[in-house]
Image: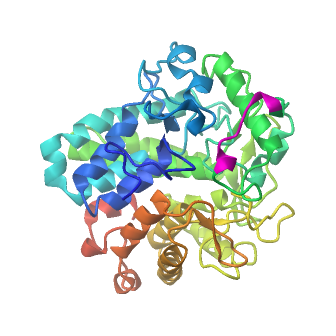
């Protein structure tokens, strides 16, 4: 792939020229079909930026690039200085916030792609304790609501940067003056596709305040704190992956299984909305669920052990008017009938390939095979048709954002290893139809 730097893969050479956290996890899932070693290196290079408190930062910066290649830049985050008490490494420089914890699931799939190579390199013994520490961080330092779920403290952390789900919470945030920062994203993207300057002013304010608190989650005064269903669903799936890793390493898996079960229960109890048929974001500062329908509320389909009635209800919501797009089989990022829907602007409507991959995997896990096959066919068609676009307009099907986007290409490669007949016949592992009945994957997605 052209986006490979020698040690990691950037999402886009122009728009996102550093290493992003959940991007690298998705990239490794695709790379495992070409080179298990390179997929392992992708995750290892990201974990080289892990902090001593366990957090995996959302960006690991390439020191060879000038600071103005991306904003906020290393000199804004000042991780090695401002994050010293929280355990930021002296090098590399990183951001101070995080992204969704899909990494353990990715690492387990990478290991399963070539267990012999994984064993030769000692991959699992090296990454397992780091990933366990990452989850410990989220479930201790980030349980800001006291209800057993991890909180996000910046809109970039759930990965859906300018979702309408954040609008109410962001109105409480005083933006910094627009002349105090210079956006690099507009050098490579259309302003009509990107978050607004007002949004960015608030993002910068939140990040600067977090930095001023030394990135200490318990000392910081969080103006923005939410429990996001997609973020926590990936934490559950990755706890199941940690349980599988522990068994492989001869360690106890019971603690991970117990934590996954507890997280699942908390997720349903705190965030499920039966009337709406999906999970809601909980605004911890405002103290109420967010009245918006977003793809993040559908991602919990990926959770093993989700109650059957909940999974079936989610599948019904996917097929209904809020998320059944006219021009794509992918899943819109926001309610098609919603007041804030915008077919072009980033996470306010466009359909993304990584969320489609997660929903596809979840549909298979819960027996909705025909729907999964339909989504897979649409994914493969539209990825190729748009030149592996970052996302697509759900109203027209037009590719938007960057082209040759890394996770789109990687997840396309992954789904090419799935087979519609295997799916229709009951395959449980959508990511490797060459062994569609792999028992170890069934332990993650029963």
User: Looking at this view, is 96 or 130 the one in front?
Assistant: 96
Residue 432 to residue 279: above or below: below
x and y percentages locating residue 180 in the rendered image:
78, 28
Q: Quadrant of the C terminus?
A: bottom left
Q: What is the quadrant of residue 315 in the picture?
A: bottom right
Q: Which residues are magenta?
A: 179-187
User: Looking at this view, is 344 or 169 the one in front?
Assistant: 344
Q: Is residue 408 left or right of residue 150?
A: left
Model colouring: rainbow
At horizontal 42% and vertical 46% (from top left) the residue drawn is: 103
Residue 288 to residue 86: above or below: below
At horizontal 36% and vertical 61% (from top left) the residue drawn is: 30
Q: Is residue 115 left or right of residue 44?
A: left
Residue 78 to residue 357: above or below: above
Is 40 part of what is drawn in magenta? no
Is 182 part of what is drawn in magenta? yes
x and y percentages locating residue 52 in the rendered image:
43, 21
User: Looking at this view, is 325 or 11 the one in front?
Assistant: 11
At horizontal 74% and vertical 22% (from top left) the residue drawn is: 221
x and y percentages locating residue 246 in the rendered image:
28, 42
Q: Could you tell me if residue 240 is visible in this image?
A: no
At horizontal 74% and vertical 31% (from top left) the residue drawn is: 181
User: Looking at this view, is 355 or 442 the one in front?
Assistant: 355
Q: Quadrant of the N terminus?
A: bottom left
Q: Could you tell me if residue 384 is visible in this image?
A: yes
x and y percentages locating residue 84 in the rendered image:
50, 14
Question: How many numbered marks appear?
Answer: 0
């Amino acid at each position: 792939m052209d986006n490979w730097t020698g040690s990691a893969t950037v999402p886009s050479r122009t728009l996102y020229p550093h290493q992003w956290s959940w991007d690298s996890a998705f990239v490794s899932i695709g790379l495992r079909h070409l080179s298990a070693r390179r997929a392992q290196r992708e995750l290892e290079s990201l974990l080289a930026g892990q902090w001593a408190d366990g957090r995996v930062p959302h960006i690991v910066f390439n020191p060879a690039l000038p600071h103005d290649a991306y904003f906020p830049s290393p000199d804004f985050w000042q991780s090695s200085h401002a994050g010293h008490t929280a355990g930021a490494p002296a090098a590399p420089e990183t951001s101070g916030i995080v992204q969704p914890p899909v990494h353990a699931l990715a690492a387990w799939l990478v290991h399963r792609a070539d267990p012999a190579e994984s064993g030769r390199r000692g991959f699992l013994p090296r990454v397992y304790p780091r990933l366990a520490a990452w989850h410990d961080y989220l479930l201790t330092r980030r349980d800001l609501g006291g209800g057993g779920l991890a909180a996000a403290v910046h809109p970039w952390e759930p990965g859906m940067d300018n979702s309408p789900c954040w609008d109410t919470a962001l109105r409480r945030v005083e933006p910094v003056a627009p002349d105090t920062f210079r956006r690099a994203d507009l050098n490579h993207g259309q302003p009509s596709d990107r978050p607004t300057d007002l949004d960015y002013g608030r993002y910068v304010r939140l990040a600067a305040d977090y930095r001023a608190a030394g990135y200490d989650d318990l000392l910081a005064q969080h103006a923005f704190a939410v429990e996001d269903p997609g973020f926590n669903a990936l934490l559950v799936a990755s706890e199941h992956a940690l349980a599988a890793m522990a068994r492989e390493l001869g360690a106890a898996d019971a603690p991970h299984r117990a934590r996954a079960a507890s997280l699942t229960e908390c997720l349903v109890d705190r965030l499920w909305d039966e009337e709406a048929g999906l999970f809601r974001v909980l605004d911890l500062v405002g103290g109420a669920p967010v009245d918006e329908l977003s793809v993040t509320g559908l991602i919990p389909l990926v959770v093993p052990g989700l109650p059957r009635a909940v999974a079936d209800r989610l599948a019904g919501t996917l097929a209904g008017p809020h998320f059944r797009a006219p021009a794509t089989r992918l899943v819109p990022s926001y309610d098609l009938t919603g007041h804030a829907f915008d077919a072009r602007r980033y996470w306010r409507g466009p359909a993304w390939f990584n969320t489609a991959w997660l929903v596809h995997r979840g549909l298979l896990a819960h027996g909705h095979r025909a729907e999964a096959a339909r989504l897979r066919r649409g994914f493969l068609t539209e990825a190729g048709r748009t030149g592996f676009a970052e996302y697509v307009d759900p109203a027209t099907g037009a590719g938007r954002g960057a082209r040759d986007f890394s996770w789109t290409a990687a997840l396309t490669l992954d789904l090419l290893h799935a087979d519609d007949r295997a799916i229709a016949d009951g395959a449980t592992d959508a990511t490797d139809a060459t062994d569609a009945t792999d028992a170890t994957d069934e332990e993650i997605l029963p």
